[in-house]
Structures are given as structure tokens and as C-alpha cells.
């Protein structure tokens, strides 16, 4: 009897080995931080392939329950190229999380190397959307309300000289671009509107900064002067 039990256990263990326990792998995070590969022994093509695989693995991982059981802060700490994005949610569905993933400049250059992922849960299903893919946008903060989504950050093309705000809207279980409908004008700032993106810069081209106030965005220049407040509903408006 004991020999039969031992034989059964041995067979069961061999099944685990040869199948690779795929049902556990489904919930495992990406094995390595391939998006910031410092292994100069590998060719450019190998490193680029690993980086792209890391991004895709991370995207797939964000669709699992395991990714939702860990805090965004702790998840981002696992990878040098992944950053938690601040989310200020003014809806009853308090399940949104966001991550900014930065690519290796030796692979992508210094400009268009950023990804933005928005993750949310609806019932028992977890959804993920790539809001940006290989763009210059470094997402730092997000406002979510019943009318839309505003992603706020800086663009590599302009460093700290411009702030961008990208507008989106929920459509069922998808997220779509939402164009800015209103006009923005101010004597100290320039607003450049293109489809769902609004770029904001000082007329003196100083570094500018923002603070997410939850329903509004405070913007000021490097001398802490010329403060403006942008309210966010379905579009941005100057307060």
C-alpha cells in the first residue's frame, strides 16, 4: 500500500515538473526587469526583444488577481523601470491603479520610450489599458471622475518646460480618447491643444510644475508665481 502511495506521489510530482505548473506561472510577475537591461554582452536585438517581452509580460500580469493583491507602491518597487502613478479617484468605483513604465534609452533613445498602463476592476474582472505606448509622456498623476480621465505629466521632448494633460473617457470596459472641447487662454501661459492632448508652457519658457488637487490642477512657474487653476470635468477649464 505504502509503495503504491509513493509511486502515485512520484508520478504526480513528475507531472508538475513537465507541465511547468502553468497555472502558477499565469499569476507570476515578469521574471526580470528586461526593460532596463544593462547586459552589454547581449546584442541590441536581444536586449530590445527582452525589453518588449518585459512590457508585454507586465501588461499580461496586470490582468491577474495576483497583481491586484499587492499594493501599487510595492509592485512598482520590484522593477527599476516601473513607477506607480498617483490616482485621485472621484467616482464610486475606487479600483483604479496606474503605472508608468520607462524604457532603456540605449534601446529607444531619450524621447519616445514611455508606456502608461491603467488598471481597474469591475466585478470579478480586471481590465488593463495601454494609454500610451512608446511615447515621450511620463505620467505622474491622474484625475478620474464620472465624466472622464485626465493624465498629467511631463514630456521628454520638452523636459520640465511643458506639462501635458491627456483626456480620456470610459466606454463600457474600454477607455477612449476624449478631445478637449473648450478654449484655454491665459496671458502668462500657452496652451497647445492637439486632439486629446493639451500641452501647457510658460510664455517665458520657464520650468513649470503642477499639483493634483483631486478635481483641479494647480500650475505655477519656477518662481512660484503666475499660479493658475485648471478644473477638470469632461474637459479642462480655467478657474
Image (spheres, rainbow, N blue to C red):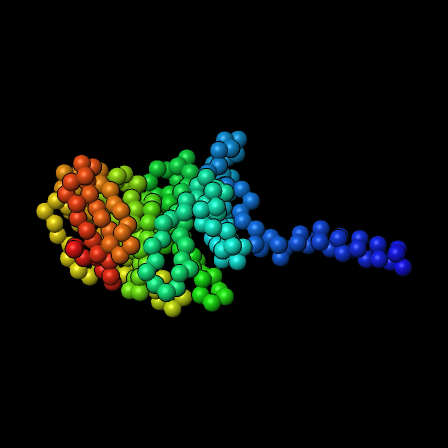
The N terminus lies in which quarter of the figure?
Answer: bottom right
Query: Is 198 situated left or right of 61 in this image?
Result: left
Q: Is residue 45 visible?
A: no
Query: Is 111 situated left or right of 8 in this image?
Result: left
Residue 6 x, y percent position in the rendering: 84, 54
Query: Is 164 situated left or right of 227 in this image?
Result: right
Q: How many marks?
A: 0
The C terminus lies in which quarter of the figure?
Answer: bottom left
Residue 139 x, y percent position in the rendering: 34, 47
The residue nearer to you, when weighing 47 against 123, is 123
Q: Which corner quadrant of the image does residue 19 belong to?
A: bottom right
Residue 164 x, y percent position in the rendering: 26, 48
Q: Is residue 200 visible?
A: yes
Residue plotted at (28% across, 61% down): 178
Residue plotted at (33% across, 46% down): 140
Relative vertical location of residue 159 with respect to residue 28 in this rendering, above or below: above
Residue plotted at (28% across, 64% down): 147
Relative vertical location of residue 40 with respect to residue 20 in this rendering, above or below: above
Query: Is 31 situated left or right of 196 in this image?
Result: right
Residue plotted at (28% across, 50% down): 212
Residue 46 x, y percent position in the rendering: 51, 39
Q: Residue pushed farthest left?
A: 187
Amino acid at each position: 500500500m505504502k509503495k503504491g502511495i509513493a509511486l502515485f506521489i512520484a508520478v504526480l510530482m513528475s507531472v508538475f515538473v513537465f507541465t511547468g505548473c502553468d497555472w502558477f506561472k499565469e499569476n507570476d510577475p515578469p521574471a526580470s526587469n528586461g526593460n532596463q537591461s544593462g547586459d552589454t554582452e547581449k546584442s541590441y536585438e536581444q536586449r530590445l526583444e527582452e525589453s518588449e517581452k518585459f512590457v508585454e509580460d507586465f501588461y499580461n500580469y496586470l490582468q491577474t488577481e495576483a497583481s491586484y493583491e499587492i499594493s501599487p507602491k510595492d509592485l512598482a518597487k520590484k522593477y527599476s523601470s516601473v513607477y506607480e502613478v498617483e490616482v485621485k479617484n472621484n467616482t464610486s468605483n475606487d479600483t483604479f491603479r496606474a503605472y508608468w513604465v520607462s524604457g532603456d534609452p540605449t534601446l529607444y533613445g531619450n524621447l519616445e520610450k514611455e508606456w502608461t498602463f491603467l488598471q481597474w476592476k469591475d466585478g470579478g474582472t480586471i481590465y488593463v489599458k495601454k494609454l500610451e505606448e512608446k511615447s515621450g509622456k511620463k505620467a505622474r498623476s491622474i484625475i478620474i471622475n464620472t465624466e472622464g480621465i485626465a493624465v498629467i505629466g511631463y514630456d521628454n521632448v520638452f523636459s520640465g518646460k511643458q506639462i501635458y494633460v491627456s483626456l480620456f473617457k470610459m466606454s463600457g470596459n474600454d477607455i477612449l480618447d476624449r478631445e478637449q472641447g473648450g478654449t484655454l487662454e491665459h496671458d502668462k501661459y500657452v496652451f497647445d491643444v492637439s486632439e486629446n492632448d493639451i500641452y501647457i508652457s510658460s510664455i517665458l519658457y520657464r520650468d513649470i510644475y503642477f499639483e493634483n488637487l483631486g478635481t483641479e490642477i494647480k500650475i505655477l512657474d519656477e518662481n512660484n508665481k503666475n499660479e493658475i487653476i485648471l478644473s477638470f470635468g469632461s474637459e479642462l477649464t480655467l478657474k
